[in-house]
């Protein structure tokens, strides 16, 4: 090991120690009692939206103030709750459900990204990494139109991704992984209650089974390859938004097909091959209610019959319980270790139907009907370039546009650009490679006549 390698490893470990020293945010306290009267379609202030997300469209009926007790009895009115307006476009909420200014829509993890020819070590816990992500709205850099400051966001995201292989055979692998992290917004776009408040993200636990299905032989041995994988993830509500909205956990499952196709061949300096990954993921949210609720927030409101009661509901709209994510990732080595990645995705979100109902009042029943939208699609586009520094740190510079397909003005948004578009920089430390270089354990022999490709970064 050279002295330069030791210096690089020490610098990376030092950066991780400094970042890890941040204090997680204290749990939010319950707000003061709100004497706002209760209405069937009233929508109180919801938790902060994800940075870069469109503001909620107005249209929820205004609350009716509580009337003073009458001096003499009067016949109660028959309230007719208005129909719920179409649900406004929601910010995309990935399976991790993190309220984050960073780019993180895909279901991939660091373990999903490691290809056989890209393994730097033979350690069982290879693929373990620590990522420092910096992301900012494109308007902060003078790109795009002029939008309100609420969506001009710049923040940091720190994520530790441990990964361990239970089964590590040449053509068959089973791995366990996790994602633990926190984030902090450095601008002031009202995404948190306190300026620059650090917040935990939702923690996820995952398992992945992969198998090599086919590999070309002869003169083109290994130039064409087909792999398949199945992923299972459980997301725990450790972020303030999820924890305070009645969420229990989210379960996601889905297959992947990875196809490697020869371009100029492994002996070329660049454009060796293209790797295409097609994935489909279904996720279901288990929660306390189909609407966002917080049992610790008991607001004093007035029901349709004029009586006061405590209520825990945070929103008048149903939340997304089911998600279907379809993604296509492309990875191409440009020149030696410099690689280009591109991702395309459709995030289909499904809400339950609230349908018809009846509110009991003193004179009988007041019928109502909710006709809000139940299908809300989001689109995602990402393009980036990656380069490894001494194999221990991967630098990824990219552009991401993940947004609601339908904008607040009722028009369909551009797939490649919207007010939610961001630039980002990932600094990813490969902890297993750092350990191997420092201790000399788990080193993998270089393959003669092959160009090493950098790790593909999870979005």
Image (cartoon, grey):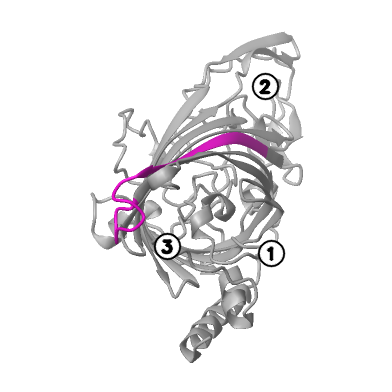
Relative to 54, 36 lies left or right:
right
Residue 218 lies in the magenta-colored region: no
Classify mark 3: helix, strand or loop: loop
Q: Position of residue 97 (x, y in %)?
A: 59, 46
Which residue is painted at 52% across and 70% down in the image?
A: 429
Q: Residues within 10 Å of mark 1 (few under 14, many from 20)?
A: few
Classify mark 1: helix, strand or loop: loop
> Which of pointers 3 and 2 lies earlier in the amino acid sequence?
2
**Residue bearing mark 3:** 452
Residue 255 lies in the magenta-colored region: yes
> Which of pointers 2 and 1 lies earlier in the amino acid sequence?
1
Q: Is residue 228 above or below residue 336?
A: above
> Which of pointers 3 and 1 lies earlier in the amino acid sequence?
1
Residue 83 visible in the current orientation:
yes
Q: CA distance from mark 2 to mark 1?
A: 37 Å
The disc label shown at residue 304, or none = 2
Question: Answer yes or no: do the residues labelled 3 and 1 have beta carbons within 8 Å?
Answer: no
**Residue bearing mark 1:** 26
The residue range painted magenta reads 251-272
Q: Position of residue 83 (x, y in %)?
A: 53, 17
Classify mark 2: helix, strand or loop: loop
Q: Nearer the viewer, residue 75 or 83?
A: 83
Q: Is residue 166 above or below residue 320?
A: below
Q: CA distance from mark 3 to mark 1?
A: 44 Å
Relative to 451, 109 lies left or right:
right
Q: Is residue 382 above or below residue 69?
A: below
């Amino acid at each position: 090991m050279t002295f330069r390698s030791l210096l690089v490893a020490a610098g990376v470990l030092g950066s991780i120690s400094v970042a890890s020293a941040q204090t997680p945010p204290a749990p939010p306290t319950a707000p003061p009692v709100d004497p706002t009267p209760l209405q069937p379609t009233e929508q109180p202030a919801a938790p902060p939206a994800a940075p870069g997300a469109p503001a909620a469209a107005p249209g929820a009926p205004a609350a009716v103030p509580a009337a003073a007790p009458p001096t003499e009895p009067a016949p109660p009115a028959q309230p007719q709750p208005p129909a719920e307006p179409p649900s406004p476009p929601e910010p995309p909420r990935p399976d991790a459900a993190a309220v984050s200014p960073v780019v993180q829509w895909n279901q991939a993890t660091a373990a999903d990204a490691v290809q056989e020819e890209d393994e730097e070590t033979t350690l069982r816990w290879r693929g373990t990494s620590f990522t420092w992500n910096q992301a900012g709205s494109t308007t902060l850099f003078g790109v795009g139109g002029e939008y309100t400051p609420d969506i001009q966001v710049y923040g940091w995201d720190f994520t530790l991704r441990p990964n361990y292989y239970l089964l590590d055979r040449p053509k068959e692998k089973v791995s366990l992984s996790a994602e633990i992290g926190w984030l902090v917004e450095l601008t002031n776009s009202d995404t948190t209650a306190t300026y620059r408040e650090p917040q935990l993200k939702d923690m996820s636990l995952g398992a992945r089974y992969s198998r090599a299905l086919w590999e070309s032989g002869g003169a083109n041995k290994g130039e064409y390859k087909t792999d398949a994988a199945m992923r299972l993830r459980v997301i725990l509500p450790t972020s303030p938004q999820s924890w305070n909205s009645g969420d229990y956990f989210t379960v996601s499952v889905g297959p992947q097909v990875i196809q490697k196709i020869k371009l100029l061949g492994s002996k070329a300096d660049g454009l060796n091959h293209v790797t295409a990954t097609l994935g489909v993921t279904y996720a279901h949210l288990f929660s306390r209610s189909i609407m966002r609720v917080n049992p610790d927030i008991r607001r004093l409101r007035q029901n349709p019959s004029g009586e006061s009661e405590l209520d825990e509901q945070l929103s008048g709209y149903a939340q997304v319980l089911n998600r279907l994510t379809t993604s296509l990732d492309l990875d191409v080595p440009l020149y030696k270790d410099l690689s280009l990645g591109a991702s395309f995705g459709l995030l289909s979100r499904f809400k339950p139907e609230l349908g018809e109902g009846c509110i009991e009042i003193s004179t009988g029943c007041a019928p109502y009907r909710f006709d809000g939208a139940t299908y809300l699609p989001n689109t995602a586009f990402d393009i980036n370039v990656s380069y490894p520094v001494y194999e221990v740190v991967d630098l990824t510079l990219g552009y991401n546009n993940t947004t609601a397909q339908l904008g607040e003005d009722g028009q369909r948004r551009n797939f490649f650009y919207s007010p939610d578009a961001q630039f980002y920089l990932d600094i990813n430390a490969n902890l297993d490679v750092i350990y191997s270089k420092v201790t000399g354990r788990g080193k993998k022999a270089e393959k003669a006549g092959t160009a090493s490709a950098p790790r593909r970064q999870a979005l």
